[in-house]
Amino acid sequence: MSIATQIQSLRNELREHNYKYYVLDSPTIDDFEFDMKLKELQELEAKHPEFFDPNSPSLRVGGEITKNFQTVVHEHRMYSLDNSYSKEDLLDWEKRIEKIIDGTVEFVCELKYDGASISLTYENGTLVRAVTRGDGTQGDDVTANVKTIKSVPLQLKGDYPEKFEIRGEIVLPYEGFHKMNEERLEAGEEPYRNPRNTASGSLKLQDSAEVAKRPLECLLYGIVGRNLAFSTQYDSLESARQMGFKVPEAAKLTKSVDEVLKFIEYWDVHRHNLPYETDGVVVKVNSLQQQEELGYTAKAPRWAMAYKFKAEQVSTRLNEITYQVGRTGAITPVANLEPVELAGTTVKRASLHNADQIEKLDIREGDEVYVEKGGEIIPKIIAVDLSKRPSDSQPTHYITHCPECQTELVREEGDAKHYCPNYNGCKPQIIGRIQHYISRKAMDIEGLGGETVALLVNEGLISDYSDLYGLNKEVILPLERMAEKSAENLIKGIEASKKIPFERVLFALGIRYVGETVAKKLAKHFKNIDAIAIASTEDLVAVDEIGERIAESVVDFFSSEENKALIDKLKLNGLQLELSAEKLANQTDKLKGLSIVVSGVFETVSRTELKKLIEDNGGKVSSSISSKTNYVVAGANMGPSKQKKAESLKIPILSEQEFLEIVK
């Protein structure tokens, strides 16, 4: 047997034993025998570096140092999930699905493991990249660290797509977590707080050899890619198992929300017997075609819903109520609590939301209150223990003036929150707007963080985001903790932001109610800032998905003389305040004013590409057929009731090719 064959044979054998031990949990050799084979492989590889393989089982021990984790844009966005907490929430979700989907809908129930989200990319059966969720659009490349996790296959088994991504959670089992803490206590070190945060922190350790020492596992739940060989979520889980991934066995195919609720009831009790942390159940529409038809909102898929188990509760003393001012001027009351342990973290503060919430619960300083984590993330007060209320307790009187600038607060009819109207003179609003402007999803100014923004404002160097473009190195060098290199990076980052595309600049302006998605729609429709600035409420409402509240907010923003001056300064500094020539070149008015429904499976282009073509040509994509629908673009397997409805309303049905001819 040649050396190359010997090395490959050992690698294959060790991969198989790794799979049996860490994925199937049924080893066929003992640890000593495994270690001997691994040692033999390491010795052969050391003598014959010409046969180096970056995915060899011998490299699972780590050793690669990563000082800076590179930011990578996800090829397929990692969306978050909408949450539900009751049977009613799930039934409402089912009704929304039935309005769009024609025919029977099945659901897959999967346990929602509490770990660090990860996306693994495989090409030709080999792991090429592991990226954290980040903000869903981009994350950090942690490939070297993830390669040390034994349940992550470096080389796949059986049949697999040429290229795909698989999503999952990096978790730390309770047993391993407790063992790590025992070792830390013996060494006189502080124990880790909870498995989830420890797993997440492990992915960002600089030395992959340290990651290899931690008993992390990777549980997979979703494959994304093109030309996949399965048509349902349930089949995709089985395919992932066949490829060698660790896919939890708890997943179940159900026919109705009643069956979903039985699954939830069972696991709400039995989850405490699981080896990992879990905080709920994820319910997904089983058919991938139906998933595609349902699509996404700005933040989450319409075809999935997370059902959260009842949150953990504790009681503690409310010491003081303080008030925070947000970038829009919104006032948020905050409960400052006696520190208490809750769901693995120390809670010191909780949001009280607004004056109505304080009045409804009659919350007072000095009260003993019950606190829970809403969705097990943000602490909130859910009740007061009136039996422990002090006899001299006084009702809470909501503040009438801004805690920062003393301006009298306003509260519009129908709005739950109070606002400080001092838009240009209230420091937290000014700082908050600039912090929003520089944030990752907006201008993404490298070298400039929230603390530096506050420092620049407090030192009087800037009073709005347009002032950033007047800064130079000499002005910012004297600032606290500002070194030569930091100052250079900050100025370079500000200069680079001039190339950020128009839709992100529009989002960065901080117009109330104008989020990422709305900014994209406005940019696409009006093409430049001047057209938006002179648009009336009626013009704005005519844009797809723009309601009256958003329209009024946009008109208010551009009617302000201060904001007009701000935009003029941004223009003078060369920011992108119109769609690029490249984006404009792909847009026409061929479908202007037309409402089009897309249904079925397509061959030449994907459903997403088809929707983009409609929007790029001025049309509006609608999810359901009505008398206002102008055309239906039908692929294979179009739902019979949709076809019947289109025919009864005499709406023209176009084939994929007929539609493509129109937009050519």
Image (cartoon, rainbow, N blue to C red):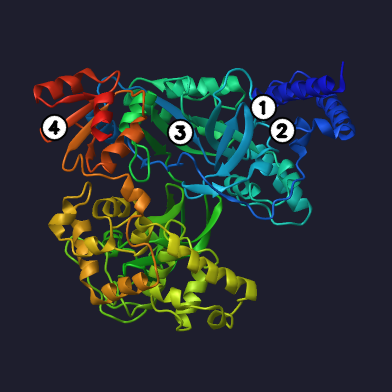
- At label 2, the amino acid type is Asn
**Would you say 118 lies left or right of 335 here?**
right
- Quarter occupied by the C terminus: top left
The residue lying at 12 percent from left, 36 percent from top is 628
- Quarter occupied by the N terminus: top right
Q: Quadrant of residue 151?
A: top right
Q: Which residue lies under the disc numbered 3?
A: 268
Question: Residue 60 location, x and y as percent?
Answer: 74, 36
Question: Residue 342 location, x and y as percent?
Answer: 51, 52
Residues at circles 4 and 2 in contact by the CB criterion of under 8 Å: no
- At label 3, the amino acid type is Asp
State the CA–CA distance, disc 4 to disc 1.
50 Å
Q: Which label number is shown at residue 626?
A: 4
The residue lying at 60 percent from left, 76 percent from top is 482
- Residue closer to the observer: 271 or 640: 640
**How many dots with numbers?**
4
Mark found first going from the N terminus, 4 or 1: 1
Residues at circles 1 and 2 in contact by the CB criterion of under 8 Å: yes
Element type at marker 4?
Answer: loop
Q: Is residue 156 visible?
A: yes
Q: Classify 271 as above or below 462.
A: above
Q: Classify 326 as above or below 427.
A: above
Q: Which residue lies under the disc numbered 2?
A: 55
Q: Is residue 275 visible?
A: no
Q: Quadrant of residue 554?
A: bottom left
Residues at circles 4 and 3 in contact by the CB criterion of under 8 Å: no
**Would you say 310 lies left or right of 117 here?**
left
Q: Residues within 10 Å of mark 3 (few under 14, many from 20)?
A: some
Element type at marker 3?
Answer: helix
Q: Which label number is shown at residue 155?
A: 1
- Residue closer to the observer: 541 or 88: 541
The residue lying at 30 percent from left, 36 percent from top is 611
